Image (tube, rainbow, N blue to C red):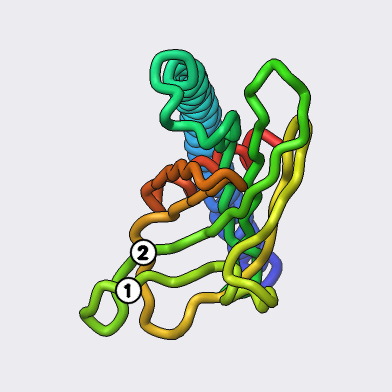
Amino acid sequence: MLGNTRGLYLEQQTRLLDNQKVNLQQTIYQLEYRNNILAVELDVERAANRSLLQELRTAQEEINQTRRELAFYQRVLAPELDAEGITIDSVLVRTIPATDSYYFRVILLHTERLQQLVRGRMEVIVRGQQDGQRTELNVLELSGAESSSVEFAMSYFSLQEATWTFPANFNPESFVIRVRSSAGQQTERQFPWGELLSSAEEIDDES
């Protein structure tokens, strides 16, 4: 009797384990099926993101090309935007990672055919709000430069760059480059602050 009882008990345990095995296998199949669906959805999402990123980069390149063409025609049709053959060719502003500081790079071009040396001074200004008041800050002074403007002399181009930190509670709105030639002619370009930073981020993404 004890042997029969033991045998029945083992049969019941075997059936119970078999049922548990079948249930676990069904659960595994369901999880694998769900995982496959999620993997496909993830691949589709990644492909869509790559396509969108490419479209954004293409649009940004078209915008940049339009700006370059506009700058060219401005030099031809509106020479008063240049100061004695000196034009502001490109401006880059970006944040310095893990700091509260910023970096700027400005390239000036000599657009006259005669490759004579031209001289001048350049100021870099940021306009914005500080404690509810409109404020204009000189970036070169913030960078610790000895002068509020930088002198240059060039035959072809001049590259100027610096790093700086804004004072507390200052909210920048626009970035201004002001160039004055040695003859006293002046040209100025103003850029929305957010637009400059967005352009810098696009460059970082592409690189």
Looking at the figure, which quarter contains the N terminus?
A: bottom right
Name the residue located 52 percent from the left edge and 26 percent from the top edge.
Answer: 57
Disc 2: which residue: 127
Disc 1: which residue: 135
State which tag comes first along the sequence, 1 or 2. Answer: 2
Q: Label 2: few (<14), some or many (≥20) within 10 Å?
A: many
Name the residue located 77 percent from the left edge and 35 percent from the top edge.
Answer: 117
Q: Are marks 1 and 2 in contact (CB under 8 Å)?
A: yes
What is the secondary structure assignment of the residue under circle 1? strand
Q: Amino acid at mark 2?
A: Arg
Instruction: Residue 182 in the image: state x and y as whole percent.
Output: 61, 47
Q: Could you say which is closer to the camera, residue 13 or residue 189?
A: 189
Q: Amino acid at mark 1?
A: Thr
Left or right, 132 with reference to 38: left
Q: Could you say which is closer to the camera, residue 29 or residue 121?
A: 121
What is the secondary structure assignment of the residue under circle 2? strand
